[in-house]
Amino acid sequence: SFLEFDAHILAPPHLQSLGTSEDAVTIVTQCSVDRLPRLQAMAAAWSGRISCAIRVPTDKEAATAALASIDQQYQTISQTGQASLSIVLYQEPAQDKGDERVAWAVPLYPINALRNAALQAAATEYIFLLDIDFVTAPGAHSAIRAWAAEQQGVASKKALVVPAIEVRQGVPLPNSKDEVARLMQAGDAEGFH
């Protein structure tokens, strides 16, 4: 039979940003507490909204430390980042490891459940599903928003596929398509795979 985990999903008011217009595009992402610095990098580059679900450990002591880190990082991002950030907390209940029905799932990372929690919390019509390790190019929010505006009134559903590149560590991120081409020609960037 199918077994469903009863997760706790919370969107505490003090971790919700209310700025940005309704025509903004929301990045939907998820992470564990150890990836919070990547969330800060994402928020520094993106000028729209971000809805991020963060996995909170089930162990009480670890959860307390995680919540303190999340609060601190949220404050830092709110003061230094461009993005309007909303955080959803996701915690699965502690499982009895002796229960064979759930023992196999205990060590697994619930990526789909986290993504769905962040997606459900997104407050804009347009969303941009993005892994926490990606940083958008300067002006990406404006460009995607302009594309979305062009789609108004179009009867068919469309998806925008955004190329991803990986830049060699220490190389500044490119600001234009020409800079990407130069970096790729020099071997300082390549398609992400």
Image: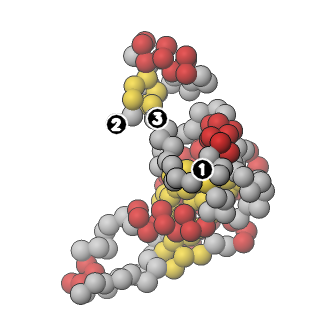
Mark 3 or mark 2: name the one nearer the start of the chain.
Answer: 3
Question: Where is residue 39 shown, x and y percent of the image?
Answer: 57, 50
At 62% across and 62% down in the image, what residue appears?
Answer: 122
Mark 1 or mark 2: name the one nearer the start of the chain.
Answer: 1
| Disc 1 from disc 2: Cα separation | 32 Å
Q: Which residue is mark 2?
A: 193
Foreground: disc 3 or disc 2: 3
Mark 1 or mark 3: name the one nearer the start of the chain.
Answer: 1
| Disc 1 from disc 3: Cα separation | 23 Å
Question: Where is residue 163 shown, x and y percent of the image?
Answer: 46, 35
Q: Quadrant of residue 190?
A: top left
Q: Amino acid at mark 2?
A: His
- Badge 1 crowding class, 10 Å Cα cut-off, few under 14, some 14 to 19, many 20 or more, is few
From the viewer's perspective, is residue 79 above or below residue 74? above
Q: Which residue is mark 1?
A: 154
Q: Which residue is mark 3?
A: 163
From the viewer's perspective, is residue 190 above or below residue 91? above
Question: Where is residue 29 shown, x and y percent of the image?
Answer: 52, 55
At 48% across and 62% down in the image, what residue appears?
Answer: 115
| Disc 3 from disc 2: Cα separation | 11 Å
Query: Does dot 1 land on a helix, a strand or a loop?
Result: loop
Q: Confirm whether residue 59 shows in the render.
A: no
Foreground: disc 1 or disc 2: 1
Quarter that holds the C terminus: top left
